[in-house]
Amino acid sequence: MWGETYSEEEVLDLEKKYTVQSYDASRLKSPVIIEKAKEVFLWDRNGKRYLDFSAQYGSCNIGFQNKEMIEAIGKQLKFTSASAMFIHTPRVQLAELLAKITPGNLGKSHFECTGSDAVEAALKFARKYTKKYKIISLWEGYSGEGTFGALSAHGLPDSRFDFEPLLPGFVHVSPPYCYRCDFGLRYPDCGLACLEVLEKTIAREGHIAAVILEPIPAGGGVIVFPNDYLPRLRKVCSRHNVLFILDEIVTGFGRTGKMFCCEHYDVVPDMLVIGKGFTSGYAAGAAVIVPEHFKIYDPTNPDETRQVHSLSGSPLACIAAITNINIILRDKLAKNAQKMGEYLLEGLKDLQEKSRVIGDVRGKGLLVGIELVKNKKSKEPDKDKERIIIEKCKERGLIVEGRCGGPQSVIVLHPPLIVGKEHIDTALDILSDVIESMQE
């Protein structure tokens, strides 16, 4: 019962008995029961410390137990909550702040609870605004699994199979995954054939409302696009009067070395979807940001179809987001992500040269992928190694993630943005030892 102290065995038994076993923890050989966290570390109930290079699915950008954040949330809890029916000051202040920090003419925000909710909202807005119904997204992209709309745009087949048929009007095309080009070509000689196919798909399909994608697909294995892909795609969308939606749920708020990843490529989307690092996981919050001139809703029309949740844009979530953004800006965490990311990539590239099982290392800022293969020449994936490496790293006190399904094998690293060289050195030492042991 509530308030009782349970043994580790009892907790695991109750987890199996009373929760639907859809969480990642249920798939681990020996799940970790987390008791506390601070900065970049987690502790289990036995007192074992873990260096967290997952940042809880890439959410906790400012690190755990940030005192400033806890004080701000605690102060807000003393005041009232509010549903989306009401206007409240924190929501207005957050919308104003987002208008100031987002690129270009993005200036109006719609708040949601989770990343999947925000993707869902963006898809609905695209259909409502354009009066067209088809959406193009990329295979290997992660659009979320929490709603049927998000899952229909989702590009990782393993997550889709059990829920098909999904929604009509969603079209998938090949990504610029240069390490595993679907067309067997090499960049730059390919001329971005994948983008040419995308443009032809727009023309052939017709009725395309939007193209939605992540600037770096994280769940798909940290696929870093060629530098000219997003600028050229922006022009393709403008040329065909198709909305260009960027999903920066993972890449936003300093993760890649800039506040938003699209700033690396000097592109401005028609819609920007944010989540995860938006509140650093201290409260459930996400948003869709659109240009100031977008008229999606007529507030004077009581018969308009709405997109709303009871707790979307709650005062608590808004205070968490404002505090989080101020910390990221003040403490220059994007700059730290760039600097530490370069240091991490350099160390992993050295490891790649010595290893027979690392086929590719790629990333931007503190979003990095290590692609594992059975043979560097054949590039045959090795899913078993991915699972074993994640488990062995955990045993050594390092938490890392794997690619979200599919045959490719990628270790994904996205630690809190407050990491220092000493943390990266520890992670590199553990990864080096674990990967070296896989070659024996």
Image: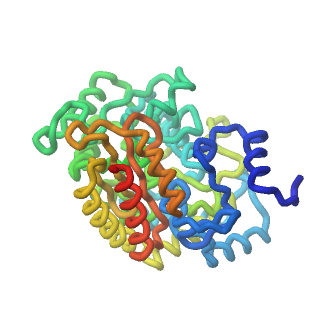
- Decide which of 120, 399 is in the foreground and name it: 399
Kindly tell me whether residue 67 is visible in this rendering.
Answer: yes
Q: At 61% across and 49% down in the image, what residue appears?
A: 30
Horizontal relation, residue 212 to residue 343: left or right: right
At which x and y percent is residue 158? 48, 31
- Decide which of 37, 161 is in the foreground and name it: 37
- Decide which of 248, 402 is in the foreground and name it: 402
Q: At 48% across and 61% down in the image, what residue appears?
A: 53
At which x and y percent is residue 183? 21, 31
Q: How many numbered badges does the structure rendering display?
A: 0
Q: Is residue 68 above or below residue 24?
A: below
- Decide which of 314, 96 is in the foreground and name it: 314
Q: Residue 281 sits in which quadrant?
A: bottom right
Kindly tell me whether residue 108 is visible in this rendering.
Answer: no
Horizontal relation, residue 239 to residue 413: left or right: left
- Check the image and name the residue furthest to the front: 440
Horizontal relation, residue 427 to residue 3: left or right: left
Q: Is residue 95 above or below residue 156?
A: below
**Colour theme:** rainbow
Q: At 36% across and 53% down in the image, what residue appears?
A: 369
At which x and y percent is residue 423? 44, 72
Q: At 14% across and 38% down in the image, what residue appears?
A: 190
Horizontal relation, residue 17 to residue 369: left or right: right
At which x and y percent is residue 381? 34, 38
